Image (tube, coloured by chain):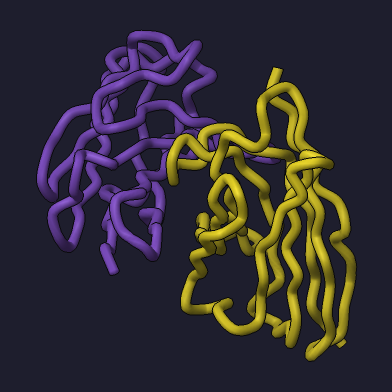
């Protein structure tokens, strides 16, 4: 099983600041099948980034993903008030599929 | 527009059974993997099961294997999750998702399952 460890657990920032979220995998994620979701309170998760670097439909370009192998990063270049939420990384390379524990981005 | 509407969630006693349904619309259902993901109250996301386009391949999380069964009816554009031998730690909001391959790309609003006596 690929264990995904996200850090930090909570990120306290202000609107306009840059957010850097980390996701570390216990083994290499094949085919770069590493993805990022955003979840706001009371809402379903929304796909932000798929296959490490690709923005999903409708996702603004302030969101970007990078990384390879076992280390991955989600960057939000300038936080909008609507970006304060939970963020989860997810791998779909190997069964069982797994999610990281999440990073809360708060004001 | 992709729409996924889950139903069937309820309060059930430990050891009981429940079947969740997910009605899909707005896309070619028979061309996509379909996936169940759950989220316990106040907790993170946990993948539960997935099924391929024609229902011939199923994968399960260890925590549910042997107790839960995923299935689909392509003629009805519907996904199901039969849950047996339910336990307290199965209490969660269960999401249905359309797969992009194995990646849950679009999600429903969820159906709440509470296992308690």
- Side of A68 relative to B59 (left or right): left
Looking at the image, is B54 positioned above or below residue B88?
Answer: above
Instruction: For the N terminus of chain B, give its image quadrant.
Output: top right
Q: Is residue A104 visible?
A: no
Instruction: For the C terminus of chain B, give its image quadrant.
Output: bottom right
The residue under the point 57% across, 45% down is: B53
Looking at the image, is B105 positioned above or below residue B111?
Answer: above
In the image shown, does A78 or B96 lie closer to the viewer? B96
The residue under the point 76% across, 70% down is: B82
- Side of B5 relative to B88 (left or right): right
Q: Quadrant of residue B75?
A: top right
Q: Could you tell me residue B79's position as x and y percent?
A: 73, 50
The residue under the point 84% across, 72% down is: B18
Say which colour chain A has: purple
- Side of A25 relative to B112 (left or right): left
Q: Could you tell me residue B42's position as x and y percent?
A: 61, 58
Chain colored yellow: B
């Amino acid at each position: 099983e690929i264990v995904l460890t996200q850090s930090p657990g909570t990120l306290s920032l202000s609107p306009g600041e840059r957010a850097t979220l980390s996701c570390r995998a216990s083994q290499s994620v094949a085919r770069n099948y590493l993805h990022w979701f955003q979840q706001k309170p009371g809402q379903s998760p929304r796909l932000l980034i798929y296959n490490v670097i690709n923005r999903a439909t409708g996702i603004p370009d302030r969101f970007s993903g990078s990384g390879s192998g076992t280390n991955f990063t989600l960057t939000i270049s300038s936080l909008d008030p609507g970006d304060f939420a939970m963020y989860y990384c997810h791998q779909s390379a190997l069964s069982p599929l797994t999610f990281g524990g999440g990073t809360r981005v708060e004001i | 527009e992709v729409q996924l509407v889950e139903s069937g969630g309820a309060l059930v006693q430990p050891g009981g059974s429940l079947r969740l349904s997910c009605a899909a619309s707005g896309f070619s259902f028979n061309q996509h993997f379909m996936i169940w993901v759950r989220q316990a109250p106040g907790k993170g996301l946990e993948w539960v099961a997935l099924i391929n386009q024609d229902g011939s391949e199923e994968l399960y999380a260890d925590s549910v294997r042997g107790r839960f069964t995923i299935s689909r009816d392509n003629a009805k554009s519907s996904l199901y999750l039969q849950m047996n031998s339910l336990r307290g730690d199965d209490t969660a909001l269960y999401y249905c998702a359309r797969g992009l391959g194995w990646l849950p790309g679009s999600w429903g609003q969820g159906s709440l399952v509470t296992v308690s006596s």
